[in-house]
Image (cartoon, rainbow, N blue to C red):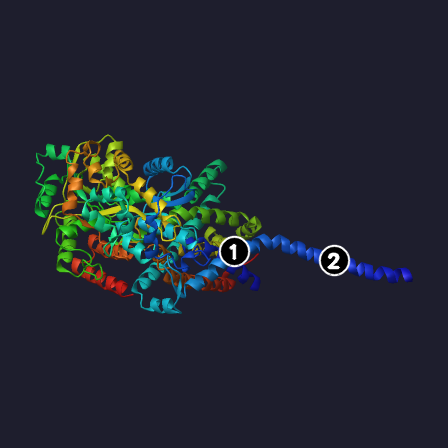
Amino acid sequence: MFKKVIGLFFILALALAACGPVATPVVEEPATSEPTESPAEATEAPATELSPDIEAKLVIYDYGDTNDEAIRREAIARFNEKYPNVEVELKFNTITTWAEYLQQLGTQVAGGDAPDIVHLATEGVKMAVDNELAIPLDEYIASSPDGQALLDDVAPAMIDSLSADGKLYFLPAAWNNMMIHYNTKVFEEAGIERPSDDWTWDDFIAIAQQLTKDTDGDGKTDKWGFAMPYYFFGVTPWLYSNGTAAMNPELTESNLSDLAVIETVQFLQDIVYEYKVAPDPFNTDPNASSTLFASGDFAMAGGGHWPIQFYMANDFSDYDVLPWPQNKEKATVFGADGYGIYPGSENKELAFALMLELVSEETLAETVSAGVAIPARRSVAESPGFLAEPKNAQLFYGSLDYAKPVTAPPEYAEMSTIFMRWLDKVMADEMSAEDAMKGADEELKALLAK
Amino acid sequence: MSITVQAEPKKQHRSLSDKKLEAITGYLFILPTVLGFVVFTLGPIIATFYFSLTKYNMLKPPQYIGIENYVDMLADLRLLEVSRNTMVFSVSAVSLTIVFGLLMAVALNQNLLLPSFIQNIFRSVYFFPILVAMIYVAMIWQFWFHKDLGVINYYLGLLHIEPIRWLGSSQWALVSIIIVYVWKNVGFSMLIFLTGLQNINKDYYEAAELDGAGSLQKFFGITLPLLSPTLLFTMIINSINAFQEFDSMIVLTGGGPGDASRSLVLYIYEKAFRSFDMGYASALAMVLFLVIMILTLVQLKLSQKWVHYE
């Protein structure tokens, strides 16, 4: 019996180890336990002039899809023309979620294998600053004409979204927002004209109702007015256009018990259960809804610039974009991404030079052809290449006049999942908007109090 | 005389070194396993225990906070729901897998009914799902379960049953995941049972037939008791699997709506890698480890009462 128990212990231990996540943290003491170089020290660096013969190695921690990787490699090649003796290692992750990306970055840092350059987005800026993953760039920009030219070419809202405490931590590269995509052919066939850019929630519902149909008469809806984007970033514009947000502007307190938040959540439930213009949002995975949007089964969908890559690949061009409909104010959400310098980097100035190449006009122009994101530079976003498709493509960059950055406290990952988990119950028609948001509010407050 | 005296110690010496050599060889043989265990299993377990006593987000060094993480568990309402889900899921998934696996094995074991090549086809077909990664299986089931476009609701509709929100309602989400688990794992249990069945000596059945036993009597009097060691093995393997079910939940429901289909392991994963609360996640993992160990020991202890070794 004793042997059996021991054997069993081994089996269990193995089994537990097999459930991976729990057991994988690196046992080694993390390298971050050494105090990282202070920002003050870093700011002294830019004074020195970089020699083209400089010999060094730079590591970039980066993410994106395969198109992005090719674009990055070309930018690195251009950098190497100026600095041929610098070896650049691109650690590229094809990831799907922020959490996954940050987790891998965390593991790398913990394992003592920290990069020089980190690619991050608005969602992670406060978290990164809190955890000393990046240094302020203001001094580097001040001493670099190219850096200043970049900032002059970028909308102020975007710079804010990559800053913390008034300091810029990441050089803006690209960004995305939320717009309403509509199928122009479906609108045309139903005799519906494009609404004004200042359209309201009511206009939106009225149009969606006209386009929701049971075409084969089997008693079930088969053409839907709207495919609801169902993730935190995609739900946020409803909150913003109702004059509210998940947290207070300082990002220190929960705002989920706000009446306007409850009203918004109620509206989302109504879209599915009262007006019945969108199918229940569970498991409508974004790719499937892009396909169904292109096939005309969904007359409208919500998304940023990223679905356009899919439309282009499928030769679909019967679409255009509209600003988000408004209730209390015209608003939508956006999030930017950019490159920052890791505090432990030994070649910060060189890293900054490489970052400038990664966000150069040339590099950003290439991202335009990939179709995924909106370039950070206004000059590139107003180029014929970017404006080629759809008809109102200028609305993307134009939205920065009224768009607000995604609510991103240091606890972004947990905050957004709390909200979505409680919203689930509302969207499953199992809980009232009020009860759900009260529950979410309590949980978020407890989290922030930790 | 002198020769024997000389020979004696020599012989003793040789046999000692033989023993030592044998021992060393033995240790060398188990060394890779022991090393593997220490590095890949014991080490992580000790590390997990250490992290469970800290506040650690992977980006900053861990900070020792004593048993605070364990105290936090007592006030964690979500923990209650995900533990309940895990119990409901494990008990139903394991019992259904075993019942169906056994029925299928018994059916396939009726040599007279089907020619052997058809039996082989059935065996392969039933075993096939276990070979496919859960992530793909779950993606296909996701289409089947879809409320408006899914195959299952289409056929239910033909029977005039209202569409069921398989994945979008708290009532059905966990049931859907149990169905997928059983579908995927039943083939493995069937195969193990089939091997067990084929090991049962035919003489017992002949003797029982001579005594006039019917097929039910034969099943409960001979098959089941002689299959009990196999049953125990299947139970333990399935329980451990079910306790760790994770990927089907991520793909099918993401644990939702709310926490309706979130298991403890998924909860631990999310605490660790979505919230970066490695300390709390480690504490949960330690508790899960103890629970699985205790449950398995209980299963083994109870098994002495019902498992018969031939």
Residue A181 lies, in percent from the top left, at 17, 39
Would you say B49 lies left or right of A277 here? right
Measured in 3D between alpha carbons, the distance from the residue under mark 1 to the one under mark 2, in whole angstroms, is 31 Å
Residue at figure coordinates x 46%, y 41% from the top left = B123
Q: Residues within 10 Å of mark 2 (few under 14, many from 20)?
A: few
Q: Quadrant of the N terminus of chain A?
A: bottom right
The type of residue carrying mark 1 is Val
In this rendered view, identify the residue nearer to me: A154 or A397. Answer: A154
- Determine whether label 1 and label 2 are within 8 Å by CB: no
Residue sticking out furthest to the right: B1
Q: Chain of mark 1?
A: B
Residue A375 lies, in percent from the top left, at 24, 40
Q: Are marks 1 and 2 on the same chain?
A: yes
Residue B103 lies, in percent from the top left, at 43, 49
Tell me if I can see residue B155 in this picture.
no
Q: Chain of mark 2?
A: B
Query: For mark 2, what is the residue?
Result: B17
Tell me if I can see residue A203 in this picture.
yes
The type of residue carrying mark 2 is Ser
Q: How many marks?
A: 2
- In the picture, the disc for residue B39 is 1
Q: Earlier in the sequence, mark 1 or mark 2?
A: 2
Would you say B138 lies left or right of A377 here? right
Q: Secondary structure at mark 1?
A: helix
